[in-house]
Image (cartoon, rainbow, N blue to C red):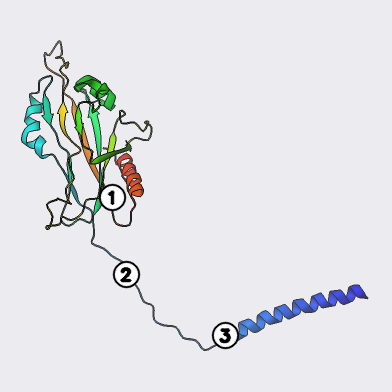
């Protein structure tokens, strides 16, 4: 008898729960209600990032000097990034690559040992690097994060922004990543052609928006861009 009574209580409880649920649904349908028209909020923007990579001293002096260089010579080369007037503020970075006379890409250590004054043992390795830029890694996922490896990435220490006409500082133009390349005095001519070797330093600029982006996020984004967009 006790067991049967218990079962009855359980059954009644279950039935009461179902009934309660049924009443809740019925009550909802009986409420007064109203629905407004749909408001569509369109988000659009004409904002963009626009930068230029220039080398004023290279164009003025360095380019012609490089065509007829001699061992031990110093060549002007000054990669600089500028933010165009229509652009939003941006973090910028420069990728530097090094190539030999056969257009084989070299690590910076290899390039310095072959072509630069003092070789890779010199503190600045034959290039006058600026302290306004910070080395952030190598634009190549299979290389050690080393300034003597290849495809070096440098990030400008502050974002570029629209120029403020009330200051003497050009907020929309970076300082050059480096200014001069000092050639080794041990570069020798080819025995057959009697000509000095050709070699190349290639620089590419990247930018990512500054607003709403931390320095670390910008750094990671710039590195990722440089890997994905290999030329």
Return the residue nearer the eye: 85 or 42: 85
In this rendering, the answer to whether 84 lies above or below 78 is: below
Q: Residues within 10 Å of mark 2 (few under 14, many from 20)?
A: few
Question: Residue 63 versus residue 190: which sits nearer the camera?
Answer: 63
Report the residue marked by disc 2: 42
Visible in this render: residue 106? no
Q: 27 or 182, which lies in front? A: 182
Residue 195 x, y percent position in the rendering: 11, 16
Disc 1: CA contacts within 10 A as few (<14), some (14-19) or many (>=20) = many
User: In which quadrant of the rendered view does residue 213 lie?
Assistant: bottom left
Which residue has dot 1 on it? 208
Please state, as top left, top right, bottom left or bottom right, where the N terminus lies in the image: bottom right
Mark 3 surroundings: few (<14), some (14-19) or many (≥20) residues within 10 A: few
Q: Which mark is residue 151?
A: none
Q: Nearer the viewer, mark 3 or mark 1?
A: 1
Mark 1 secondary-structure assignment = strand
Q: Are marks 3 and 1 in contact (CB under 8 Å)?
A: no
128 versus 38 height, above or below: above
Q: Are marks 2 and 1 in contact (CB under 8 Å)?
A: no
Vertical side of 198 occupied by 21: above or below: below
Return the mark for residue 29.
3
At horizontal 25% and vertical 26% (from top left) the residue drawn is: 123
Q: Nearer the viewer, residue 211 or 27?
A: 211
Relative to 229, 51 lies left or right = left
In the picture, the quarter occupied by the C terminus is top left
Give how far across and how far down residue 196 sits, in percent. Answer: 13, 18
Distance between the Cα atoms at labels 3 and 1?
Answer: 53 Å
Choose top left, top right, bottom left or bottom right for residue 228: top left
């Amino acid at each position: 008898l006790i067991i049967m009574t218990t079962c009855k209580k359980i059954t009644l409880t279950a039935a009461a729960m179902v009934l309660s649920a049924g009443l809740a649904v019925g009550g909802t349908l009986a409420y007064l209600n109203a629905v407004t028209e749909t408001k569509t909020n369109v988000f659009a923007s004409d904002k963009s990032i626009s930068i230029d990579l220039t080398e004023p001293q290279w164009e003025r002096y360095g380019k012609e000097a490089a065509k007829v260089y001699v061992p031990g010579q110093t060549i002007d080369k000054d990669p600089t990034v500028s933010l165009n007037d229509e652009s939003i503020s941006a973090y910028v970075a420069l990728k530097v690559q090094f190539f030999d006379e056969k257009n084989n890409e070299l690590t910076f250590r290899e390039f310095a040992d072959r072509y630069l004054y003092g070789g890779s043992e010199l503190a600045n390795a034959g290039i006058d690097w600026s302290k306004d830029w910070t080395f952030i890694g190598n634009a190549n996922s299979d290389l050690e994060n080393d300034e003597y490896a290849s495809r070096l990435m440098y990030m400008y220490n502050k974002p570029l922004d629209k120029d403020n006409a009330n200051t003497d500082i050009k907020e929309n133009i970076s300082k050059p990543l480096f200014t001069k390349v000092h050639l080794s005095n041990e570069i020798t001519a080819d025995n057959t052609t009697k000509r000095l070797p050709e070699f190349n330093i290639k620089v590419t600029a990247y930018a990512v928006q500054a607003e709403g982006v931390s320095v670390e996020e910008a750094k990671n984004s710039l590195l990722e861009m440089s890997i994905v967009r290999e030329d």
